[in-house]
Amino acid sequence: MTVLAPPTISRTGQAATRPPRRRRSWTGWAFVGPFMAVFAFVFVAPIAYALYLSVFRTRLIGGTSFVGLENYQQAFTDPQFWSGTWRVTLFLLVQVPIMLFLALLVALAIDSGRLYGKAFFRVAVFMPYAVPAVVATLMWGFMYGTRFGLIGNLNDALGVILPDPLSPDLVLASIGNIVTWEFVGYNMLIFYSALQVVPKSLYEAAELDGASQFQVIRAIKLPAIKGALLIATIFSIIGSFQLFNEPSILQSLAPNAITTYFTPNMYAYSLSFSGQQYNYSATVAIVMGVLTMIVAYAVQLRGTRKDK
Amino acid sequence: MTTQTTPTTAAAPRPASPARNRVRRKEQRRSPLLTALTALMLIYSLVPLVWLLINASKTQEGLFSSFGLWFDDDFALFDNIRATLTYDDGVFVRWLLNTLLYVVLGAGGATALATLGGYALAKFDFPGKRGVFAVVIGAVAVPATALAVPTFLMFSKLGLTNTPWAVIIPSLISPFGLYLMWTFAASAIPGELLEAARVDGAGELRTFIRICMPLLAPGIVTVALFTMVATWNNYFLPLIMLKDPDWYPLTLGLNAWNDQAATAGGQAIFHLVITGSLLTILPLLAAFLFLQRYWQSGLAAGGVKD
Amino acid sequence: MFTNRRAFLRTAALATAAITTAALAACGSDDGGDTTSPVTADQVQAALDKGGSITVWAWEPTLKQVVTAFEAKYPKVKVNLVNAGTGNDQYTALQNAIAAGSGVPDVAQVEYYALPQFALGKSLTDLAAFGAGELDGTFTPGPWSSVKTGGGTFGLPMDSGPMALFYNKEVFDKHQIAVPTTWDEYAAAAKKLHAADPKAYITNDTGDAGFTTSLIWQAGGKPFAVDGTNVKINLADEGSTKFAGTWQKLISDKLLAPVGSWSDGWYKGLGDGSIATLVIGAWMPANLESGVPGAKGKWRVAPMPQWTAGANAAAENGGSSLTIPKAGANNALGYAFLKYATAGEGVKIRVENGAFPATTAELKSAEFLGKEFPYFGGQKANEIFAKSAADVVPGWSYLPFQVYANSIFNDTVGQAYVTDKPLTDGLKAWQEASAKYGKDQGFTVG
């Protein structure tokens, strides 16, 4: 993704007058080589293998045969695959903006210097990120329980009937809540760090001009952290499309609401692990990977175009 | 995918001031209103953790009979911790040690590889450089499940499944870490410094270790922390690679304990699952708190600007 | 009575064998190496004397004690007992290991419903080669017919789950509800209970493939017919329709607690009386004792409610066998352990630790039948379980891809629990999705 372009502007200022000092040489490979070797082994080789798998079909009866692009044809007309894809798209359109907006608000609030106990806020909001997704989901799953969990307690204590967060209508929102909880602090930190390097002279100039806080935010802060916003968005898009851990662990609590094809990733998993359809599973995963790249790339293009 | 943007200029004019010290204007007036509003977010973040802490202090029976956000009459936290650590011949301790092993080798290795790689991308021009990062980031978009089965079959043929290597080797790659080190190294190591070292005739490796490593320290700590979280929280990969509970990391072990209630003849130990979860997140929280100063400057200085 | 059943079984086995031989012959050439050469008892004994180590994949908790006793008896043998996950998790692991051709255990626990899939995939050793045929009569009919699938004996029954009605007597007494003997009475009791206490439900159900198939089994349904690679699926047969009729009433009137089995909420409900009954396999007492210790003395056991008043029909729910994967390294030693655990001294050890046996000798022993369960107020519950085991409706079979079919149960039938869709539609959707998978996998689905 091109958004992650090398940061050629450095704060030390040498970039502005970057001399053509670096000869092209193979020396760099000595440093990047180890990374790339392991990378080839754990990423490139399996992807190549998945591509290979995707053009075959193995059956319990009849063995393996070459089927060309049939698996891809099947994927494009598979209602279960597309229902999962639409679901994560919906998730993406709702959860990601909410999460990033909250993260941005907190980052701006902490950066404004107008909070009591700023350091505490910064660390406390970030803490959920350190909680493993497994633990976070188990924990929220316990709390979501209408009979024994926190929801059940609240129903009893207040004498109300809150809607069941694990019902089919609400389960996607409940998962969104878990994901938001896990990552809002992480994104906040990224935004906050970016805000930290905005030169103070800009604020001083704005203050002299009598600009309000909101004007400062709109005119200086937001443009300054645009790169961070873009990166956070793209990582969130990838994360949404790959949604797996949270729904799959919650599935045992809400088996009818979370189907085996709830997200494309879960679909790929259940195809290969319950159904042994390794070939079709690899196909689904590849199609999903390509879709993810296209969307992320489109977002990036839009992001940088506005930049100019 | 393969095209990389040319250096973008930031929207806001960026003075070439070499000042590295924290940029902060004069103290603002504190606002109770803003503090209160932000505190809502704080509550949202902390309530589940408080819930975990409170419920780790309850017995299996108490979990079912008492209010979720307050303590039961019976304060059993220490009994639970003891029970968690000794249940099934202390298998939890074994899982903790496994996790530490995966973190030290996996996250440690990932940090080393990312540091070397990021440094090379930032400071060297070499054939194929443009392709390197495009390929790495492109691969991130491929769902983990797509890789799961092929990786499993591959590792299995090599006899690596059910060994710690099956978890450690894939953990060695951290694309985010590579990106972070790249950006960090680009801004933290002045080109003139390298030029000077080369003029002095110092070897590349020596230059890297003696001159660059100290400058990269905050970045290295940051990458180490993020890869540590990733390894510590790793679930999916060990789930398919490991079948011997003796090699489980904590996440898998906790899930196995949770599943145990669903086995004919199995024992329901939800209180130990909750206490175990608490014990699992404490070391990470501690690491983040203690190393706060480093990772925050690491992120701020280079990580994510532009 | 007993000899009759044996005779029946033998005929059935022969018939299946004949059919499958035909199917295999039709199937083609890749079965060349399929016949395992016989292994005599002497060879197994020799393997024991020589010693060595074997790996056993099982999640059944009482095997731990069996391994200890086995290693004490044969000091040269080391048994590496690994819990590779429960049920589906372990099958996945096993299938992956078999696909990869390495890391395959010597002995693996496989539930009855999953056995046909592994047998058909030619992943398991036909234990007939070890003389497992001699064990005819050792095991109760339900489990024994389950392991004799696809023309071989692909495992030995380890435990069984003849079903019974577990009910909370305290709740029944409090609301003066009679213990139901038929499913109609059960539905009436459900209504009465929920009306008397809106927090209480007759039972919980969020859609469970094992439970549903067991009830259809008891109702005399035979929705899955397997003949080699020809598969017939009919989830609208008489038994399935009977089940759907009764259960639809319970679902529509919201008389089933929407709590998933084995969840924390489930254990809570079993303890506080809000889940008043369970119709479940005879292995349940151990789970009640450890998971719901607080309800000790409140629960009782009764025979399964019947579809026809006065009948004595039962079904199996759960239960598993021990098998020997073909790719395992040490088949002879594996068999020695397998036999020890399922038909030898291991049985007694397991029963003592709370497992429910699948062997006729144990089920008929006075000691076993006379055991008083303090948890059930001193009731001799094993008498009911043993009777249920003898009353299991014969002729049931699972699909050769039941593991997959069960995994999509909640995608299809489960929708009837959370939407207005009728249960019969759900069953139909399940049938269609399973049939589609079967066809994709090369079966002839009729």
Image (cartoon, coloured by chain):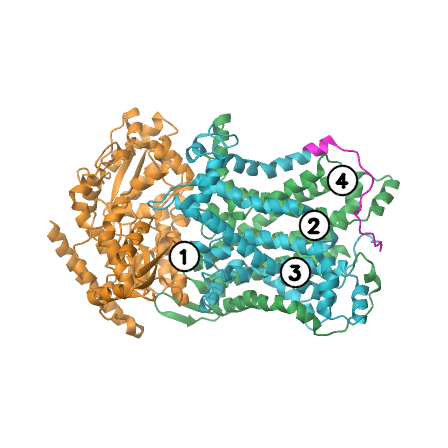
Chain colours: A green, B cyan, C orange
Q: Which residues are magenta?
A: B15-36
- Amino acid on which the number 4 mark rests in the picture: Ser
**Which element is circle 2 on?**
helix
Residue, disc 4: A112
Residue, disc 3: B178
Mark positioned earlier in the residue sequence (2 or 3): 3
- Disc 2 crowd, CA 10 A, few/some/many (<14, 14-19, 20+): some
Closest to the observer: C56 or A165? C56
Q: Nearer the viewer, mark 4 or mark 1?
A: 4
Q: Pick the quarter of the image with the C terminus of chain C.
A: bottom left
Instruction: Give me the C-alpha separation between circle 4 and circle 1.
Output: 52 Å
Q: Chain of mark 1?
A: A
Left or right: C226 as drawn, with respect to B197: left
Instruction: Give me the C-alpha separation between circle 3 and circle 4.
Output: 31 Å
Across and down, in percent, residue B268 comes to 39, 41
Q: Is residue A61 magenta?
A: no
- Amino acid on which the number 1 mark rests in the picture: Ser
Q: Chain of mark 4?
A: A
Q: Nearer the viewer, mark 4 or mark 2?
A: 2
